[in-house]
């Protein structure tokens, strides 16, 4: 399981390796209680969820002290893998589904992550502000930006949005500057053939 991560991130510290290797058992534990990942998909946890989340780490290096919000964090992706990867940045996951947040909090505690938290709240009702937003395909990009524009200072933040498939029509209405990063440039597995990180200036 860990081999796939070390293949692309050989510089991981001993503590990061330990935490990433613990994710398998922690998610197995919580997935039995709350359906975070489908049973069929669970055997691909490290490729399709953890490594996919770390696609963002291939296009941005969050600086020390950066504050990042994961909107619609669901089972804690990309929230938890990014918090392990960037221990000097602060991560906060929000989601409207309480059971999922409870499970994510359990994973965070199980790892002993002190730079990461999760909260049950809808993005529209969340009042904090952040330097960056991350998310994994919650809705169409224009709709996502409409729901979350109050979470970052105008003209200063950035969004890193994990998305798959054909995006041309979805990107057409965007007034913001954006850049599309193909994850197939970084990861050779077939799963990433159509996967992207869309970087949007906020």
Image (cartoon, rainbow, N blue to C red):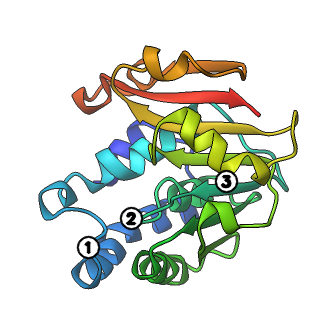
User: Label 1, label 2: how many angstroms apart (C-alpha)?
Assistant: 21 Å
Q: Residue at x 27, y 29 (%)?
A: 189
Left or right of 190 in this view: 142: right
Question: Looking at this rendering, what residue extends furthest in the left direction?
Answer: 40
Q: Residues within 10 Å of mark 3 (few under 14, many from 20)?
A: many
Q: Earlier in the sequence, mark 1 or mark 2?
A: 2
User: Label 1, label 3: how many angstroms apart (C-alpha)?
Assistant: 27 Å
Element under disc 2: helix
Element under disc 3: loop
Q: Residue at x 14, y 64 (%)?
A: 39
Q: Residues within 10 Å of mark 2 (few under 14, many from 20)?
A: some
Q: Residues within 10 Å of mark 1 (few under 14, many from 20)?
A: few
Marks 1, 3: nearer the viewer: 1
Is residue 68 positioned above or below 139 on the image?
Answer: below
| Nearer to me, 19 or 65 | 65
Q: Residue at x 32, y 52 (%)?
A: 46
> Which residue in the protein does label 1 denote?
35
Residue 59 image position (x, y, % from top left): 61, 29
Q: Earlier in the sequence, mark 1 or mark 3?
A: 1
Residue 141 quadrant: top right
Is residue 187 positioned above or below 111 on the image?
Answer: above
Q: Earlier in the sequence, mark 3 or mark 2?
A: 2
> Which residue in the protein does label 2 denote?
21
> Which residue in the protein does label 3 denote?
86
Element under disc 1: loop
Give the position of the N terminus as an image quadrant: bottom left
């Amino acid at each position: 399981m860990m081999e796939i991560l070390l293949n692309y991130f050989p510089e991981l510290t001993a503590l990061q390796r330990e935490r990433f290797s613990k994710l398998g058992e922690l998610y197995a534990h919580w997935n039995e209680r709350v359906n975070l990942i489908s049973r069929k998909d669970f055997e691909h946890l490290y490729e399709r969820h953890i490594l996919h989340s770390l696609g963002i780490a291939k296009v941005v290096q969050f600086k020390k002290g950066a504050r990042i919000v994961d909107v619609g964090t669901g089972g804690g992706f990309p929230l938890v893998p990014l918090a392990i990867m960037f221990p000097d940045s602060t991560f906060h996951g929000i989601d409207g589904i309480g059971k999922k947040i409870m499970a994510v909090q359990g994973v965070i505690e199980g790892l002993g992550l002190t730079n990461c938290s999760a909260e049950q709240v809808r993005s529209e009702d969340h009042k904090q502000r952040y330097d960056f937003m991350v998310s994994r395909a919650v809705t169409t990009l224009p709709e996502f930006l409409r729901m979350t524009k109050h979470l970052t200072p105008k003209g200063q933040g950035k969004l890193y949005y994990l998305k798959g498939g054909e995006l041309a029509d979805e990107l057409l209405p965007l007034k913001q500057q954006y850049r599309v990063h193909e994850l197939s440039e970084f990861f050779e597995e077939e799963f990433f053939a159509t996967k992207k990180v869309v970087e949007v200036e906020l």
